[in-house]
Image (cartoon, helix red, strand yellow):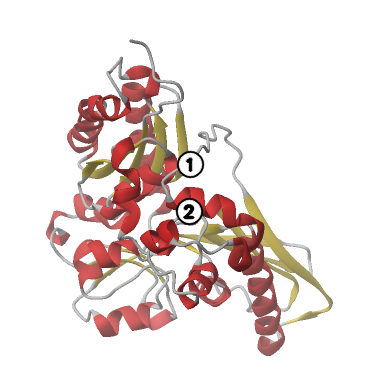
Amino acid sequence: MGHMQGARVIFHLDMDAFYASVEQRDHPAWRGQPVIVGGSPERRGVVCAASYEARKRGVRSAMASAVAQRVCPEGIFVSPRMGVYQEESRAIMGIIHRLAGEAVQQVSVDEAYIEVTGRVGEAADHDALLEKARPLAWEIKRAVVAERGLTATIGIAPNKLLAKIASSSFKPDGLTVVPESGKAGFLRGLPVGAIHGVGRVTEGVLQKAGLATIGDLQDTGMDLRSLVGAWGRELKRLAHGEDERPLDLGDEIKSISSENTFPQDTADRLLLRACLREQAGELAEKLARNRLGARTVSVKVRYRDFTTLTRQLSVEEPVEDAATVYRFACALLGRHRLVERPLRLLGIGLAGLQEMHLRQMQLGLE
C-alpha cells in the first residue's frame, strides 16, 4: 500500500506544569499543593511557573509574585532551580530519541515536535496512519512516568499546527489524535488566537471584524488581506488545518537583544528605568513582527572597570509584551542587586524564542 502522498504523522509533546511538577516530585510534601516557582513576593519577584493547583486559584506565569500571593495566600513559593530543569529536560529528550528516533525539534526545555511518519508502518488512509501512531505515543508517555516520575501530554496530528493545539487543549496527561478528515471540525470552536502566529494584536483586529472563532475564519467570504496584509492567505489555510511547515532540526538557539552604553556612568534609577522601558518596547516589537515569544529574559550590565555581568530567568509561558519584559528585567536587576554602583552599559536579551500560539488556551479548557 505504501505511504499516501505527503501524509505525515507529527507528535507534539508538552510536559505538564514542568518546573512545578519537578519540584513536587522532589518534595513529596508539596504534591497536590499550590506550588509557585519564582521570586519571593517580598522582593518584587516574578512567577516563572505554577502547578495546576496554583493555576486553578488564578496564578499565572509572568505575574508579579506579590499578586500571586494575594490570589493564592496558601501558595508555596519556591526558587527556580534552572540547572535541575535543564538536566531533566535532557533526560526526557533522551527518552524521546531512544523511542522515536532522530526527527525531533525541541522547542523549549519542556516541549518538542516529533515526526514519526516513517516509523508507524503502513495504513489504508491518513486517518488510519495517525491512529496507528497511538501506541508509540503511549510508550513515550509511560517511559517518562516510569523513568522520570513526570507526566507529559501528546497531540498526534497531520501537521505541527494541529499537534500543538491537540496537546495544549487536553492537559494534563492527555493523548489526543486529530484525524486528517476531521481537522477543520476540530478547529471550528476554538478562538482565533489558537492559530500559530496570531498574537494578541492580530487577535484583536480579527475580533473587531467579527471573527472570534476559527470557524468564523473558515466561513468568512472576507478577503483577510484587508485585515492582516499579505499573511491573509496563509491564515485562511491555517484556519482549515493546513500547515506544511517542516520540523526545524537546526540546533541554533535564537535570541535577540538591545543594549545602551551611556555617555557617563550612571546609577540614576529614572534614567535606567526609561532605558529599560525603551529596550523592552523595541524587543516586544521585534517579537510581534516575527510572531515569536521568548522563554528566557536576561539583563546585562557593565561597570566602570568593564566588569560585565548577565543574569537570566526562564518562564513556562512565552513572554511577548513589553510590560512583561520590562517587569522581568527590573526583577532581575533588583534580585541580583546589579545597580549598587554606576553602570556604563545596560541591556536586555530574549532567548528561547518560539512560535506563538494561544497562551490562554488552557484557561478555557483545563
Residue 300 appears at what percent x and percent y?
66, 64
Residue 57, by quadrant, is: bottom left
The foreground one among 296 and 233 is 233
Q: Residue at x 23, y 52 (%)?
A: 170
Answer left or right for 101 relative to 203.
left
Residue tagged by mark 1? Answer: 243
Residue furthest top in the image: 1
Q: Report, in whole angstroms, how far the alpha carbon at label 2 lies from the one at label 1.
A: 10 Å
Residue tagged by mark 2? Answer: 196
- Mark 1 burial class by Cα count in 10 Å: few <14, some 14-19, many 20+: some
Point out the tag, 2 or 1, that comes first from the N-terminus: 2
Residue 100 appears at what percent x and percent y?
34, 24
Residue 45, by quadrant, is: bottom left
Q: Residue at x 59, y 44 (%)?
A: 253
Inspect the image, locate mark 2, and give the three-letter code of the amino acid beneath it: His
Find out whether the residues at labels 2 and 1 contact each other: C-beta distance under 8 Å.
yes
Residue 325 appears at what percent x and percent y?
55, 71
Answer left or right for 180 relative to 44.
left
**Vertical comparison of 140 with 39: above or below:** above
**Vertical comparison of 66 with 20: above or below:** below
Q: Is residue 341 visible?
A: no
Q: For the residue labelled by badge 1, is the local secondary structure a helix, a strand or a loop?
A: loop
Inspect the image, locate mark 1, and give the three-letter code of the amino acid beneath it: Asp
Answer left or right for 250 relative to 200.
right
Q: Residue at x 57, y 58 (%)?
A: 291
- In the picture, the quarter occupied by the C terminus is bottom left
Q: Residue at x 26, y 27 (%)?
A: 133
Residue 39 appears at what percent x and percent y?
40, 71
